Image (cartoon, helix red, strand yellow):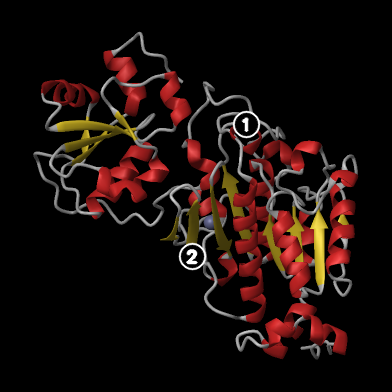
């Protein structure tokens, strides 16, 4: 072990408030000075993360981004300003970070992270912080961090929500593919360029990512490894969910099928940063894929099935119950609003999947809840979740609204 770097009087003055914290102290500050952190994406998440990590005295703070600053970035990407427009983001960001803290070394990687350079690049750093906003990069960063055995600090934002986790399979945690084994179909999921994002939400999530980096480096507190922190700014509420590693994960599971970083052509994604509108015929995954599922810590389905309220119900039976007595039965449609615009069942109550955990009070306990999504996957997980929460009269509509359209309503639009 090399001896920790000695801090100059001027550095000691700068970090005085850290030195007062027993969980950081001089030893922690020296560890920060010796640390090498790579921030992928000098944008909405990378900005607050990089600013806090530079100010905190992380000795080497690498920046990887191939993009240039545009006017619409300035609403949330605080590393850049009006004078940066047209400039490479890494150049603008490095200038800003050096002004924040001249003691920090800021190597820049203006070609960004690619399947070709990811292995070498990641191995030069201790921790990787993912500040990217597209699935191509998210899967690439996840896979490359796994093979380099580096912790990946994951963050994502969408409209008024965001989430953070620490993916670290080398130390017992899950990876991103444990949640979502494969990328969504190109164009099936709106990203922030289409759906919007509140700038300050990036500030919250990027700051949380910086915090997790500091905790890993200094050993302060418990890292978010094996857990996912979800933030809903409108509620406002934080939820922390358990996120165990998935033994069937194609990357970090017991019988992996991905044995190296995939070249771009095989990643299952195009390089589109702004996918087409969501009414894609290829839609296969939850709309909140970018935000990960709301209840990944779902327990096993109830072991005490009630024959009156089966776990699964076919669309014909569901329709019969729905029409027979609306005072006793309600269809809960857990799809996203844009999916509802494509098609919906009259009388069904829309509650998007990721909002269910926060809306348990709203759900009637005296009615049979029939849970509906596009094809039965999301609704199956919500059914399990609700049963675990004590709702006994809950059934998953097998095949979802797509099966409904095929079996019961040929005029309904399908997607
Ligand atoms: Zn995994």
Label 1, secondary structure: give it. helix
| CA distance separating discs 1 and 2 | 30 Å
**Residue beneath the point at 83% across and 87% down:** 5
Q: Are marks 1 and 2 in contact (CB under 8 Å)?
A: no
Residue 66 coordinates in the image, percent (x, y): 83, 45
Is residue 36 among the parts visible in the rendering? no
Above or below, 182 relative to 276: below
Q: Which residue is mark 1?
A: 194
Residue 106 or 185: which is nearer the viewer?
106
Q: Residues within 10 Å of mark 2 (few under 14, many from 20)?
A: some
Q: Residue at x 48, y 65 (%)?
A: 226
> Of the residues under marks 1 and 2, which one precedes in the sequence?
1
Quadrant of residue 298 within the rendered picture: bottom left
In percent of width and height, residue 232 lies at: 48, 50
Q: Nearer the viewer, residue 274 or 87?
A: 87
Mark in the foreground, 1 or 2 = 1
Residue that extends furthest to the left in the rendered view of this protein? 308
Residue for point 30% across, 21% down = 345
Quadrant in which the N terminus is drawn: bottom right
Instruction: Classify 10 Å Cα crowding around label 1: few (below 14), some (14-19), many (20 and above).
Output: some
| Residue 411 appears in view | yes
Q: Is residue 384 left or right of residue 341?
A: left
Q: How many marks?
A: 2
Element at badge 2? loop
- What residue is pinned by disc 2? 226
Q: Quadrant of residue 59?
A: bottom right
The circle drawn on residue 207 is none
Give the percent coordinates (x, y) of residue 312: 22, 37
Q: Is residue 115 above or below residue 372?
A: below
Q: Residue at x 35, y 21 (%)?
A: 344
């Amino acid at each position: 072990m090399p001896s920790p770097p000695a801090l100059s009087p001027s550095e000691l003055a700068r970090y005085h408030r850290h030195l007062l914290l027993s969980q950081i102290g001089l030893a922690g500050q020296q560890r920060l000075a010796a640390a090498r952190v790579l921030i992928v994406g000098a944008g909405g998440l990378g900005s607050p993360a990089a600013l806090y990590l530079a100010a905190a005295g992380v000795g080497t703070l690498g920046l990887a981004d191939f993009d240039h600053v545009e006017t619409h970035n300035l609403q949330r990407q605080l590393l850049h300003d009006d004078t940066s427009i047209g400039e490479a983001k890494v150049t603008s960001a490095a200038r800003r970070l050096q002004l924040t803290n001249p003691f920090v070394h800021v190597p820049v990687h203006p070609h960004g992270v690619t399947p070709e350079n990811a292995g070498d690049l990641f191995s030069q750093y201790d921790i990787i912080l993912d500040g990217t906003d597209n699935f191509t990069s998210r899967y690439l960063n996840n896979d490359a961090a796994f093979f380099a055995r580096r912790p990946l600090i994951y963050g994502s934002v969408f409209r008024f929500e965001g989430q953070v986790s620490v993916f670290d399979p080398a130390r017992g945690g899950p990876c991103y593919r444990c949640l979502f084994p494969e990328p969504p179909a190109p164009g099936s999921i709106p990203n922030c360029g289409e759906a919007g994002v509140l700038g300050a939400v990036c500030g919250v999530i990027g700051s949380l990512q910086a915090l997790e980096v500091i905790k890993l480096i200094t050993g302060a507190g418990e890292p978010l490894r094996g857990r996912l922190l979800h933030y809903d700014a409108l509620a406002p509420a934080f939820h922390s969910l358990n996120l165990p590693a998935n033994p069937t994960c194609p990357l970090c599971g017991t019988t992996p099928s991905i044995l190296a970083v995939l070249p771009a052509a095989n990643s299952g994604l195009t390089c589109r940063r702004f996918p087409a509108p969501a009414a894609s015929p290829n839609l296969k995954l939850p709309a909140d894929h970018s935000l990960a599922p709301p209840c990944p810590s779902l327990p096993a389905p109830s072991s005490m099935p009630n024959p009156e309220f089966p776990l699964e119900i076919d669309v014909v039976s569901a329709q019969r119950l729905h029409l027979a007595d609306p005072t006793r039965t309600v269809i809960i449609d857990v799809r996203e609003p844009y999916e509802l615009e494509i098609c919906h069942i009259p009388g069904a109550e829309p509650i998007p999947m990721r909002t269910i955990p926060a809306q348990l009070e709203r759900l009637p306990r005296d009615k049979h809840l029939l849970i509906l999504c596009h094809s039965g996957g999301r609704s199956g997980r919500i059914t399990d979740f609700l049963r675990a929460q004590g709702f006994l009269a809950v059934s998953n509509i097998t095949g979802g609204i797509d099966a409904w359209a095929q079996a019961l309503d040929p005029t309904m639009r399908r997607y």
